[in-house]
Image: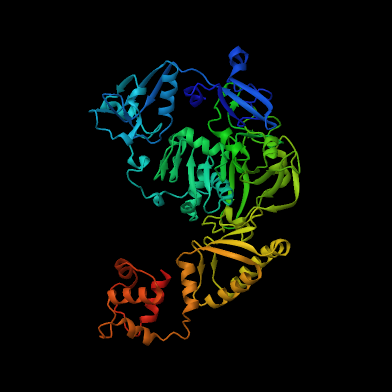
């Protein structure tokens, strides 16, 4: 809406909000209370355009003139140019200032300090001075109170990525309902995903992902415009520790609204039979507001809602040895209700959009699909009584899946879950029918025995056979990043893949990494017939019977085409002298690195 005002457009046209309380046909049109709902202005703010563009409904959010804009930056020069070097998020200072300026309004900027003209490099100017009318400098003794980096954080260079902090030193979560819910939800994480975590229970997913060694393989984001790192929690929500990149908030929502996210994990205050969710209004007189929830929940294909089954007083008895949980004391407030206070997420709208929606609690997991117009119970925790602990604690009756199963017991254990969070081989193969191409993601696949090699190529054969029988050989793109093949299995693996390629591949492109290169090299240079004495003599340039680090580096480069830095050899070999006796083991160790 602000950006639309800056361009004097009538408003912002989007499908975000359809089916929720912001939709005038469903709710209040976004009004915060009854007085606002009765205001003539409210009817003008959000207009529903029914099937006017491509047969699809849209909402038009009216642009509003801005008379006064109050923005924040770090440094200002005497011309009003602003820089944002100490700000933990970029927000929308520039477009807010632009909207106010183009509305005939004034722009007031709060900063920490002043500098001379020309001190701020042009590329570092976040808001041009032409858009700023007044600069207010916060007294240096009051900056912690009036110019903090979040609601509670004063000054921390980690939030601006000026320095990096060792987040691996953060303490582990205790085994409470929060960790149980976060553990089950984290099973939906896949490597390479871009993910949004909501405030509250979803924050625990970052902790669990770090504990399970998954945090390095996904990109966490916040709607405040931060990519990567570890998002702040609670009243520090918005910034992130060790962020990779910062984006303006409006640009981040362009990314979200355009379905850029792979997955979203969001909280839920109330859930009804149709899978509708309320997060914006706790009671008639207590409004929280939706924040970015509606954009994220409606525009992301894979959405998981996290909630305790009941609230206010819930106590669990978790057996961390057997992997079971029992309700010690039930919460006073039911979360699965007949009617939600406010419709912030619509289950029917999610089905229409083709989203995958899951609802995770500490004792049960539900989903909403086109197969049923109510929630379907698909998992129950070990130790939980279906009737007493689930059905009697709900104000509606869900569909019980005929394939109802127990939640993984490892979720309830004290130690690490050690669950495979990287997905099945089937889920790693993506088929594009338009160009008859299969994309195979072998990230972190580890084959440690001949049986696993046989399983791998048999499963791949089963996946590819229907495609090649129908349309002929396929083009294949394989990502070997992180692929691991145990030493000694190279011959079996290459032979199996040769059969697969002849049978199914029209062409193949590989993202080659060290692990795949090692397998390829070992096939070309058969270690069973490799003459170590001859190779050693060829690398021993000064013929003293000992390979210096320089000789070993040159030899590996010449024979294998692999360039190692001096530091690599120091780390691998240390002070050990390389002789005929330890030559083969040293070379193998270097190749494995």
- The image position of residue 519, as x and y in percent, is 49, 72
In this orientation, which residue lies closer to the viewer: 310 or 186?
186
Residue 480 is at least partly visible in this image: yes
In this orientation, which residue lies closer to the viewer: 329 or 304?
304
Left or right: residue 99 versus residue 571 is right
Quadrant for residue 504, please give it. Answer: bottom right
Q: Is residue 592 above or below residue 318?
A: below
Q: Is residue 227 above or below residue 415?
A: above
In this orientation, which residue lies closer to the viewer: 317 or 437?
437
Quadrant for residue 142, please give it. Answer: top left
- The image position of residue 26, as x and y in percent, is 68, 25
In this orientation, which residue lies closer to the viewer: 234 or 118?
118
Q: Residue at x 61, y 59 (%)?
A: 424
Q: Residue at x 62, y 17 (%)?
A: 43
Residue 198 is at least partly visible in this image: no
Q: Is residue 45 above or below residue 484?
A: above
Q: Residue at x 31, y 21 (%)?
A: 136
- The image position of residue 515, as x and y in percent, is 47, 67
Q: Which color scheme does this rendered protein use?
A: rainbow
- The image position of residue 257, as x and y in percent, is 56, 36
Q: Is residue 411 above or below residue 33?
A: below
> Looking at this rendering, what residue extends furthest in the left direction?
116
- Total labels: the figure holds 0
The quarter of the picture where the C terminus appears is bottom left
């Amino acid at each position: 809406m602000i950006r639309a005002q800056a361009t004097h457009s009538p408003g912002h046209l989007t499908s975000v909000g359809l089916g929720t309380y912001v939709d005038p046909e469903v709710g209040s049109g976004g009004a915060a209370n009854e007085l606002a709902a009765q205001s003539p202005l409210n009817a003008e703010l959000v207009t529903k355009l029914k099937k006017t563009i491509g047969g699809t409904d849209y909402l038009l959010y009216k642009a509003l003139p801005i008379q006064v804009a109050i923005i924040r930056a770090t440094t200002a020069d005497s011309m009003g140019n602003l820089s944002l070097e100490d700000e933990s998020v970029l927000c929308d200072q520039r477009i807010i200032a632009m909207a106010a300026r183009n509305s005939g309004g004034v722009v007031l900027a709060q900063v920490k300090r002043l500098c001379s003209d020309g001190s701020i490099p042009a590329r570092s100017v976040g808001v041009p001075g032409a858009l700023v009318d007044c600069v207010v400098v916060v007294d240096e003794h009051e900056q912690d109170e009036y110019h903090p980096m979040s609601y509670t954080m004063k000054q921390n260079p980690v939030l601006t990525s000026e320095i990096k902090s060792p987040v691996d030193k953060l303490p582990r979560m205790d085994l409470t309902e929060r960790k149980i819910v976060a553990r089950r939800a984290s099973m939906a994480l896949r490597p390479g995903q871009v993910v949004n975590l909501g405030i509250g229970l979803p924050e625990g997913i970052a902790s669990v992902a770090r504990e399970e060694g998954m945090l390095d393989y996904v990109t966490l984001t916040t709607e405040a415009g931060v990519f990567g790192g570890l998002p702040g929690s609670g009243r520090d929500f918005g910034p992130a520790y060790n962020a990779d990149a910062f984006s303006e908030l409006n640009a981040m929502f362009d990314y979200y609204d355009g379905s850029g996210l792979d997955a979203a994990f969001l909280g839920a205050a109330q859930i009804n039979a149709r899978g509708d969710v309320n997060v914006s209004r706790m009671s008639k007189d207590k409004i929280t507001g939706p924040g970015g929830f509606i954009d994220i929940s409606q525009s992301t294909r894979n959405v998981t809602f996290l909630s305790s089954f009941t609230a206010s007083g819930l106590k669990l008895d978790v057996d961390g040895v057997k992997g079971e949980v029992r309700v010690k004391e039930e919460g006073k407030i039911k979360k699965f209700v007949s009617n939600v206070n406010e419709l912030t997420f619509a289950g029917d709208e999610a089905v229409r959009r083709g989203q995958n929606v899951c609802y995770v609690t500490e004792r049960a997991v539900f989903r909403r699909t086109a197969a049923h117009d109510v929630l379907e119970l698909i998992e129950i925790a070990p130790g939980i009584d279906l009737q007493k602990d689930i059905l009697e604690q709900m104000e509606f009756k869900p569909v019980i899946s005929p394939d109802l199963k127990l939640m993984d017991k490892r979720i309830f254990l004290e130690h690490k879950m050690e669950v495979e969070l990287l997905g099945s081989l089937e889920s790693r193969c993506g088929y594009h029918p338009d160009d008859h191409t299969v994309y195979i993601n072998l990230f972190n696949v580890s084959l440690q025995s001949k049986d696993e090699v046989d399983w791998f190529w048999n499963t791949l054969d089963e996946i590819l056979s229907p495609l090649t029988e129908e349309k002929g050989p396929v083009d294949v793109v394989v990502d070997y990043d992180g692929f691991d093949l145990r030493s000694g299995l190279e011959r079996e693996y290459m032979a199996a893949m040769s059969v697969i390629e002849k049978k199914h591949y029209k062409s193949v492109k590989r993202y080659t990494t060290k692990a795949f290169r090692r397998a390829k090299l070992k096939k070309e240079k058969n270690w069973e017939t490799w003459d170590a004495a001859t190779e050693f003599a060829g690398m021993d340039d000064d013929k003293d019977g000992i390979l210096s680090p320089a000789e070993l580096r040159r030899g590996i480069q010449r024979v294998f085409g692999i360039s190692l830095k001096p530091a690599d050899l120091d780390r691998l070999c240390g002070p050990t002298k390389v002789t005929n006796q330890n030559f083969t083991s040293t070379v193998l160790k270097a190749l494995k690195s």
